[in-house]
Amino acid sequence: MPQIHRLHLIIFFTTLAALGLIPLFSVAGDVVENAILSSNSNLTNKEWLHLGIGMLGGLAFMLYGIEKMGNALKVIAGDKMKQVMWRLTSNRFTGLMTGAFITAVVQSSTVTTVLLVGFISTRLMSLAQSIGVILGADIGTTLTAQILAFDVSEYALAPVFIGFIILFFSKKEKIAQFGHAVMGVGLIFFGISLMSQSMYPLRSFEPFLDIMATLSSPIYGIAAGAVFTALTNSSAATLAVVISLASQGLLTLEVGIALTLGANIGTCLTAGMAAIGKNRDAVRAASAHILFKVLGVLILLPFLHLFAEFIIHISPSATEGLDGVQALANTVPRQVANAHTFFNVGIALLFLPFTTHFAQFLTWAIPDKPLDTKEIQPIFLDAFLLSTPMLALQASRSELSRMGDEVLAMYDHLIPALLHGSQDDLKAVAKLDDDVDSLYAHIVTYLGKISQHNMTEKQANEMLGLTYATHHMESIGDVIEVNLVAIGRNRLQHAVVISPESEKVLLTIVQVCHRAIKDSIRSITDLDREAAQRVIDMKKEFKSIESKAKKHLTKRLGSRDKNRLNNFTVEMDIIDKLQRIYFHSARLSKCTINILDAEPQKDS
């Protein structure tokens, strides 16, 4: 079977499964319509208005609070998140814990996914390693549900006030971000409180109660949760609504679990849609997320009643003296949060031993795209990474490494063509610069896009350093294509034959330049200070060899060779252009030193 057909086959069966849900939505729609038409609503227009404003306004406060808290914590954590994930994902178990920890800290599985795709794309992490982190990220998201289930509505505005005070008086960036995080927590609780209060009239609204009765069928509940999550682009929004309904006694645990399972599917479908058009690593990571959630729901579905009983057993009982709706309101929010946690922990422990097998399957099912044979294309420069500058910069360095390989290959092909080759050999060398120029254009454009996003001072300095380094690397290619190839053609035109003695002298400079190019490329792609310093320290060695070579060529002017003047001109021109190559290699290495030495200014 051709590779492209594998993905088509998976999409086909997924589509069939999705189409199978359409009759379920039709039946649910009929129930809603009949319930509304057959009921005498006791809600006035004013009450409907208050309900809508409270629901939407509370949801907005809650989502804004989660975003505010997550962004602040991401700034506080800074590049440490990258370092933690990089160092602690050597095996599936540490990867699981790392994914859970980072997602719990930043309150966003999207941030974790972006980091993962960046590491995979830049070859710092394998797909199998990333799968363990994805499973951990699913566990980390459960903290949101646990936070939402706390009944702290009376104190919701206290963190908002405390966060504002911190922001108002703080002069240091990290303390200010801590204020944002505290304020975000308060906004989350305040939003939940608004939604819960606005839903109180629904306790006696028969059409709504009939809808909730319809959702007692697990399939309907899962479908409703998935659709709502996909539409709102947030599982947190679905969980907030579910917990708000539960806090008014409007949901049974079974309905809450079904909606929560649907939210788990809906959030990964959103991630899957976001990965469309991205690189294959992003698609595979998103597909792994979808695969785990769907398989987990399918496995749990036949045992949903037993799962609900288990959650009731391990969750706190209702406060003494409460029954009916009040008992549901007192217990179900926490039970829903616990169900969400145990589901994600369960699928993580179930699938963790098989991460390698899942990675192999996804690589088979979603093969790499064939590269455009007409023009070299970038591999690492993915727009998906731009929102996380530290990963986008890493991707730029990885692409710069490819460009460096092209430059070094061009240099290696040049020397024999320059000294002994034909016109066709020189033309082939010049043609190699097309790939260098193409990668140069892609990298510089990508770095420009990174500059449009918020960066730390250190990241901005690295972006500029990479831009200058890319320019110097491209200049080496230009010296080879324009200058040295022209010298080779001049050699052929004037029938210059380089003597074995002169060739030996020239090759000493050639070797120094080769080391300079290789070490300068390594210095910028790996941010290797030692490699950069070696190139800079070559200056004395290069000057010494250059001086000896020029003295040798000057002595050759006294020979009786009739073509000695043309020989001298060609050989001196070669030395001058090799000197130019060393100059650009040294300047490139200084870009590396500048990046490494740059320190962000301290807060005053």
Image (spheres, grey):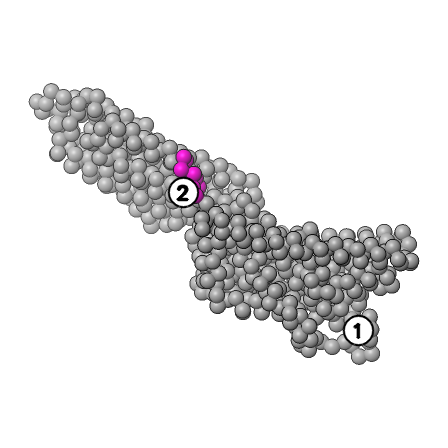
Q: Nearer the viewer, mark 1 or mark 2?
A: 1
Residue 266 visible somewhere in the drawing: yes
The image position of residue 215, as x and y in percent, is 75, 63
Which residue is at the far bottom? 320
Tell me the residue that label 2 is attached to.
400
Q: Residue at x 19, y 35 (%)?
A: 506
Question: Which disc, if any, is residue 432?
Answer: none
Residue 371 point in image, percent of width and height:
43, 41
Q: Magenta region, mostly helix, strand or loop?
A: loop
Residue at 73% x, 65% y is 217
Q: Nearer the viewer, residue 154 or 391?
A: 391
Q: Secondary structure at mark 2?
A: helix
Q: Residues within 10 Å of mark 1 (few under 14, many from 20)?
A: some
Q: Is residue 375 magenta?
A: yes
The picture quadrant where one finds residue 344 is bottom right
Q: Which residues are magenta?
A: 370-378
Position of 337 compared to 478: left or right?
A: right
